[in-house]
């Protein structure tokens, strides 16, 4: 598995707590959530050009089975923040331009730099974003739980449990189209 990341035009620091004195620009994602402070991910983001801002990202779920952290996106001006499996894609040049990934929760994030994709895994399917936004979403791959393997010849190998056979099934996803072979939905 590669540990490569996309090049990016920003710096980000995950803060242990919200600063006592807020910076001039502070954005909350999503703005309409109640009690966003409880467990929120606080990130100080400094774009290559423009003003630094504090991003407060609402927590989805607490626990080790969901993703939390900051990832670079295929577009170098965008940042992906995950707070307890809730994924927020933020344009660092214009923090009011953002999108929340539809999976709640995201259980794994995989940057596929050579393919130009940032891959999000739910418990059942995969979703890919490229430099211009959402590229594709797979059909259901497993009854429960995904385990992702290596990329070879433009295909991602993975496994997931099939409740009909009560065993782990292998699948392959075409990284250009999101079409798959194997798994439970074949």
Image: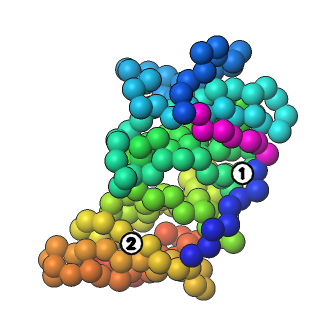
**Which one is in front, 44 or 168?**
44
* Residue plotted at (58% across, 71% down): 176
Figure quadrant of residue 55? top right
Would you say the magenta stretch is mainly helix, strand or loop? strand
**Which one is in front, 74 or 64?**
64
Q: Over which residues does the magenta segment extend?
A: 9-15
Q: Is residue 145 left or right of residue 50?
A: left
* Residue plotted at (60% across, 85% down): 153
Q: Position of residue 120 (x, y in %)?
A: 48, 58
Q: Is residue 179 above or below residue 15?
A: below
Q: Residues within 10 Å of mark 1 (few under 14, many from 20)?
A: many
* Residue plotted at (68% across, 61% down): 5
Colour setup of the view: rainbow
Is residue 186 visible in the rendered structure shown here? no
Q: Is residue 165 left or right of residue 117?
A: left
Q: Which residue is mark 1?
A: 75
* Residue lying farthest to the right in this orientation: 49
Q: Which mark is residue 84?
A: none
Q: Residues within 10 Å of mark 2 (few under 14, many from 20)?
A: some
Q: Quadrant of the N terminus?
A: bottom right
Q: Quadrant of the C terminus?
A: bottom left
Q: Position of residue 146 (x, y in %)?
A: 36, 68
Q: Which mark is residue 147?
A: 2
Figure quadrant of residue 14? top right
Circles 1 and 2: CB atoms closer than 8 Å = no
* Residue plotted at (49% across, 69% down): 178
Q: Is residue 105 above or below residue 157?
A: above
């Amino acid at each position: 598995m590669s540990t490569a990341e996309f090049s990016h035009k920003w710096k980000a620091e995950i803060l242990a707590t919200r600063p006592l004195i807020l910076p001039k620009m502070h954005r909350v994602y999503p703005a309409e959530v109640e009690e966003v402070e409880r467990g929120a991910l606080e990130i100080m983001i400094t774009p290559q050009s423009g003003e630094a801002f504090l991003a407060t990202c609402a927590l989805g779920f607490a626990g080790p089975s969901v993703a939390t952290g900051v990832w670079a996106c295929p577009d170098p001006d965008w940042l992906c923040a995950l707070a307890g499996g809730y994924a927020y894609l933020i344009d660092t040049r214009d923090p009011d331009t953002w999108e929340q990934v539809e999976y709640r929760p995201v259980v794994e994030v995989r940057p596929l730099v050579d393919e130009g994709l940032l891959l999000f895994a739910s418990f059942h399917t995969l979703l890919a974003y490229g430099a211009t936004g959402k590229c594709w979403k797979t059909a259901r791959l497993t009854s429960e739980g995904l385990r992702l393997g290596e990329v070879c010849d433009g295909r991602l190998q993975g496994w997931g449990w099939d409740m009909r056979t009560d065993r782990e099934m292998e699948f392959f996803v075409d990284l250009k189209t999101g079409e798959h072979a194997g798994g439970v939905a074949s």
